[in-house]
Image (cartoon, rainbow, N blue to C red):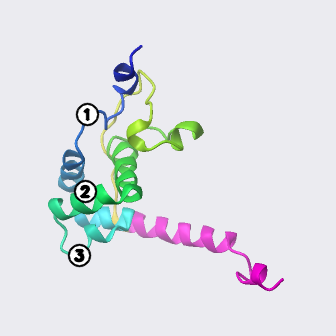
Amino acid sequence: MSDKEIYKNNPLHGTKLETVLNELVDHYGWEILFAYLNLNCFKTNPSIESSIKFLKKTTWAQEKVEAFYMYQYHSLPKASDDQFLLPPRDRIVPHGLEQRPPKELSLEDAERLRIKKAEKARDRAPADPWAHFKK
C-alpha cells in the first residue's frame, strides 16, 4: 500500500487549510469556533484571510483547528494513542471508518467543557506552585 493510499481516509488529505476553515465557519460560525477552540483569530474581527495567516504561522493552533475538523466536523472516533501524538494531517484513519455528519455544538456545551477543563487543571496543580523553588 502506497503512502498516498494510507492517508486517503484522512479528511485532511489533499484539503487546503482555507477549505477546512470555510467549511467550519459555514457550518458552525465564528462564535462557536472561538468558544470551542479559544483562538483570538476567531473572536476579534474574524475573517478567513486573517485566520489563515495566523494559523499558517502558528503550528499548534493550525493542528488544533485541524483536529477539531476531523473529530467534531467529520465526527471521526478519537485517534489511538500513537496516532494522537502525530499532527492531524499525518494521522492514519483506518480503512472502512466512515465520516459522519458534523456534531451538533452549542455555546452552552462549550462553556461546560471550559469549566470541566479548568477544574481538571486546578486539581492537577500543586497546592503551592512555588514549592519546588523553596527547597
Quadrant where the N terminus sits is: top left
Q: Which mark is residue 44?
A: 3
Q: What residue type is labelled 2?
A: Tyr
**Mark nearer the viewer, 1 or 3:** 1
Q: Which amino acid does label 3 sit on?
A: Thr
Please report whichever mark, 1 or 3, sits nearer to the chain's N-terminal start: 1
* Residue ID for mark 1: 14
Please report whichever mark, 2 or 1, sits nearer to the chain's N-terminal start: 1
Please report whichever mark, 2 or 3, sits nearer to the chain's N-terminal start: 2
Secondary structure beneath label 3: loop
Quadrant where the C terminus sits is: bottom right
Q: What stretch is highlighted in magenta?
A: 108-135
> Does the segment drawn in magenta span residue 21?
no
Tag 2: Cα neighbours inside 10 Å, few (<14), some, or many (≥20)?
some
| Residue 70 visible in this rendered orientation of the protein | yes
State the residue at coordinates (37%, 43%): 70
Q: In this view, does 37 lie above or below 127?
A: above
**Count of all numbered marks drawn on residues in the image:** 3
Q: In this view, does 117 lie to the left or right of 103?
A: right
State the residue at coordinates (38%, 39%): 89
Q: Is residue 82 left or right of residue 37?
A: right
In percent of width and height, residue 41 lies at 27, 68
> Does the segment drawn in magenta span residue 113?
yes
* Residue ID for mark 2: 28
Q: Which mark is residue 80?
A: none
Q: Can you tell which quarter of the image residue 45 is in?
A: bottom left
Q: Which of 17 and 71 is in front in this view?
A: 17
Tag 3: Cα neighbours inside 10 Å, few (<14), some, or many (≥20)?
few
Secondary structure beneath label 1: loop
Q: What residue type is labelled 1?
A: Gly
